[in-house]
Image: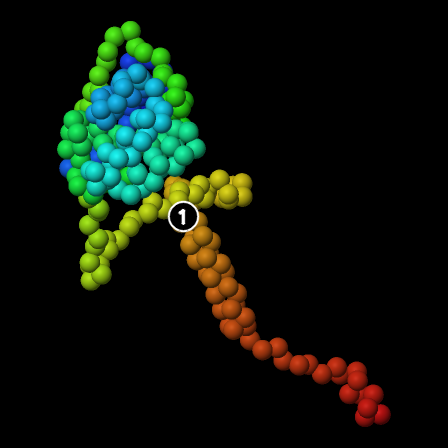
Amino acid sequence: MYPSASNFASASPASAWWTVQVSGNTVVCSTTGNEFIRQLQQRLGVSVDGSWGPATSTALSRALKAANAPAAFVTAVDADATTRTLRIGSLIGAVWLLHRAALGPVPAGVTPSALSLQGGTVLPTWSHAPPKASSGTGITCSALASQNPAPAPAPSPAPVPSSDATPAPTLLPLPVTNVQSSLPPGVSLLPQSRPYATWPAVALIVGVSVVGVALAVVLTKPPAVARANPRKRSRRRR
């Protein structure tokens, strides 16, 4: 059953499935392998036994040529009839013919890419009928549009600023540094009360006054008068 691997050798309902593109829509069709071959044999007008053998292959080749099917389909069916094997090319040719006949419109000149069988599909064995389902299942087709919602629209890109626009300045916070903790003991940046702020001025005034008094004393002292020694003079006379 879709979307698991397709199996044309199984009796499970909807085990054999394929997809086809019709008018831009993807359609999935499913059945069992035995029912698929029976439907094909009825369309070809050969014995309906659910076994794909030489008679089914030859009749399919003639029907494809008459319907102007793509040459690739006819070539694949003729090759399998020669080698007595059943490969996926013949199966796709049979799917194309069934859609043209009864399963729904297939555009004229359709290519193999419009019909798709999943890689790894299990095929029936040549001249051996796949097991039958407990009841006839027929072939059912349904569009996958509802199972494949449209993707969400992509978000619109952010507007690109003009090259003439001046970008607004970016203000960054300044780091806070504890300067007080890095100062030596006893030194502080904090404001201090100054109860003794006048003492330096007082000391300066007192010092200037003392120096002034000392200068005044020196300047007012009379000069000393040199006195001669009378004894020295009397000796020189002698």
Q: How is the image coloured?
A: rainbow
The residue closer to the viewer here, 71 or 165, is 71
Which residue lies at the image location 22% right of the left edge and 61% below the top edge? Answer: 163
Q: Residue furthest top?
A: 134
The residue closer to the viewer here, 173 or 180, is 173
Q: Quadrant of residue 20?
A: top left
Q: Which residue is mark 1?
A: 197
Q: Quadrant of the N terminus?
A: top left
Which residue lies at the image location 20% right of the left edge and 30% below the top edge? Answer: 99
The residue closer to the viewer here, 39 or 230, is 39
* Left or right relative to 21: residue 176: right
The residue closer to the viewer here, 14 or 134, is 134
Q: Position of residue 118 (x, y in %)?
A: 34, 30
Which residue lies at the image location 68% right of the left edge and 81% below the top edge? Answer: 227
SS class, disc 1: loop
Q: Position of residue 124 (x, y in %)?
A: 38, 22
* Left or right relative to 231: residue 23: left
Q: Is residue 2 above or below residue 162?
A: above
Which residue lies at the image location 49% right of the left edge and 58% below the top edge? Answer: 207
